[in-house]
């Protein structure tokens, strides 16, 4: 059974930083893309960033690409999201997800992901 467990969320002032972690277990992830999505109150879940197994392919949403950095440690089955220069509009529940490799996938849509974590709350005060 695949499990994804996020951590690192919390309350931070605007301009601050947080680092989210997601530990995956329950299958071999050596061909999977791991990603982060977020959902703010009253809004649809949106793509944040994703990274391939090798780390050579990285996908980022325009709203965060200059502030957030995704990385992964395959030895630990862990993906990270370093979030800098946080803004009030970054407030959301952040979800980790795993997508099995697919030739036609963009890795930017939530319906392309097969496994999801429970989410971690990030609140940015202005």
Image: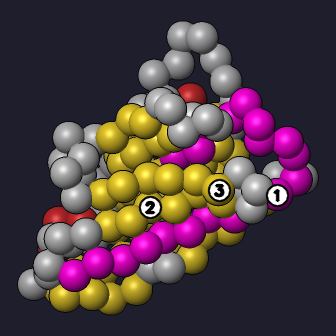
Whether residue 110 appears in magenta in the rendering, the answer is no
In magenta, the rendered stretch is 16-35
User: Measured along the vertical axis of the image, is residue 36 above or below residue 93?
Assistant: above
Dot 2 or dot 3: first in sequence order is 3
Looking at the image, is mark 2 or mark 3 nearer the viewer?
3
Read off the residue under disc 1.
Answer: 25
Crowdedness near tag 1: few (<14), some (14–19) or many (≥20) residues, C-alpha within 10 Å: some
Q: Is residue 99 toward the left or the right of residue 105 in the image?
A: right
Q: Are marks 1 and 3 in contact (CB under 8 Å)?
A: no
Identity of the residue drawn at 19% across and 51% down: 66
* Figure check: 11 above or below 15: below
12 over 109 or under it: above or below = below
Residue identified by numbered label 2: 81
Mark 3 lies on residue: 73
**CA–CA distance in space, label 1 to label 3:** 13 Å
Lower position in the chain sequence, tag 2 or tag 1: 1
Residue drawn at (50%, 53%) of the image:
71
Which numbered disc flags the more N-terminal residue, 1 or 3?
1
**In this orientation, does residue 33 appear?**
yes
Q: Secondary structure at mark 1?
A: strand
Do the residues bearing badges 2 and 3 touch, measured as CB atoms within 8 Å?
A: no
Binning the other alpha carbons within 10 Å of mark 2 as few (below 14), some (14 to 19) or many (20 upward) gives many
Residue at 39 percent across and 65 percent down: it is 82
């Amino acid at each position: 059974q695949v499990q994804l467990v996020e951590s690192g969320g919390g309350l931070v002032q605007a301009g601050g930083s947080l680092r989210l972690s997601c530990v995956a277990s329950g299958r071999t992830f050596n061909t999977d893309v791991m990603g982060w999505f977020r959902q703010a109150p009253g809004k649809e879940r949106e793509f944040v960033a994703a990274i391939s197994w090798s780390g050579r392919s990285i996908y980022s949403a325009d709203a965060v690409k200059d502030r957030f950095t995704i990385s992964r440690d395959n030895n630990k089955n862990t993906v990270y999201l370093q979030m800098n220069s946080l803004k009030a509009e970054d407030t959301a529940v952040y979800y980790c997800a795993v997508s099995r490799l697919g030739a036609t996938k963009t890795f930017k849509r939530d319906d392309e992901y097969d496994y999801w974590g429970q989410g971690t709350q990030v609140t940015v005060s202005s």
